Image (cartoon, grey):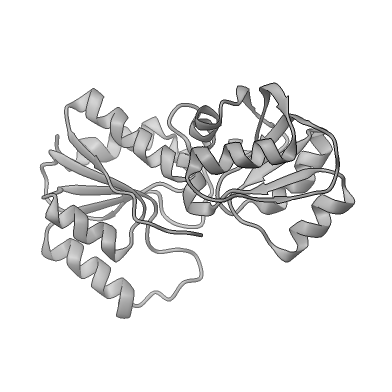
Amino acid sequence: MDRHSLSSYLNEFLNVAKFKDYAPNGLQVQGKDKIRTIVTGVTACQPLIEQAIALNADAILVHHGFFWKNEPEVLTGMKYKRIKALMDNDISLFGYHLPLDAHHGVGNNAQLAQQLGILNPAVYEEVPQDLLWHGHLMQPMSAAEFNNHISRVLHRDALHIGDCAKPIHTLAWCTGGAQDYIDHAVAMGVDAFISGEVSERTYHSAMEQNIHYFAAGHHATERYGIQALGEHLSEKFGLTHHFVDVVNPV
């Protein structure tokens, strides 16, 4: 498959033009014209790039790429080393941030619902760009039971905040650093809200508004979308796909 065709397909498949984002979505670093082997991972860090080189990858697809709003524009230090490694090995880098969070099939939110067994996942339309989702469990769980369930499925200890005794049946979620959507979850009337990160203020929001909050890890909640996207491309275009999960406890 040629690079231009892959880029065009991904931009349309992920509906990139719909999103106002904090970084460019799509091709971020240009590599070779022909793409046969792709590597996917959460973040375009040096270990991911080095493993992609070892796997003879032609392109890397990530959720967290380069050129974020307000970051230094100069190519020095860590960013220089990363981009130099890509260019020295003629590897393309594609990054998809909010479009990958929101996609109804391979997106992070859709895939997290699938992993956790959340039923009838749907978008909460009061929040723009399809970023906040809601659904329900097959059977209600206590906070401790659900915390153990998240931790077991995501292979990371989740943090539960909240002292309300009500069981969890309905919930809302947004992967990554979306802890401040907790107020929307309260407005929806759900029993619990899940995201990746937690802030000092999140504790007070959960406790004072009588809602369960689960911080399940930014990386842990966002590893499934990019993997599903790679599998989709492999099935559709016959590309060799390797998902590389660089350990990140945050």
Q: Residue at x 76, y 40 (%)?
A: 185
Is 1 left, or right, of 23 in this rendering?
A: left
Depth check: 175 or 246 in front?
246
Up-down relation of residue 115 to residue 52 (above or below): above
Residue 135 visible: yes
Is 44 left, or right, of 5 in this rendering?
A: right
Up-down relation of residue 25 to residue 22 (above or below): above
Depth check: 22 or 49 in front?
49
Residue 18 visible: no
Percent from the top left, x then y, of residue 163?
84, 48
Q: Residue at x 89, y 52 (%)?
A: 208
Percent from the top left, x then y, of residue 24?
41, 54
Q: Which quadrant, please, contains the N terminus?
A: top left
Percent from the top left, x then y, of residue 237?
20, 27
Up-down relation of residue 119 to residue 54 (above or below): above
Q: Residue at x 35, y 78 (%)?
A: 74
Percent from the top left, x then y, of residue 84?
20, 69
Is 126 left, or right, of 83 in this rendering?
A: right
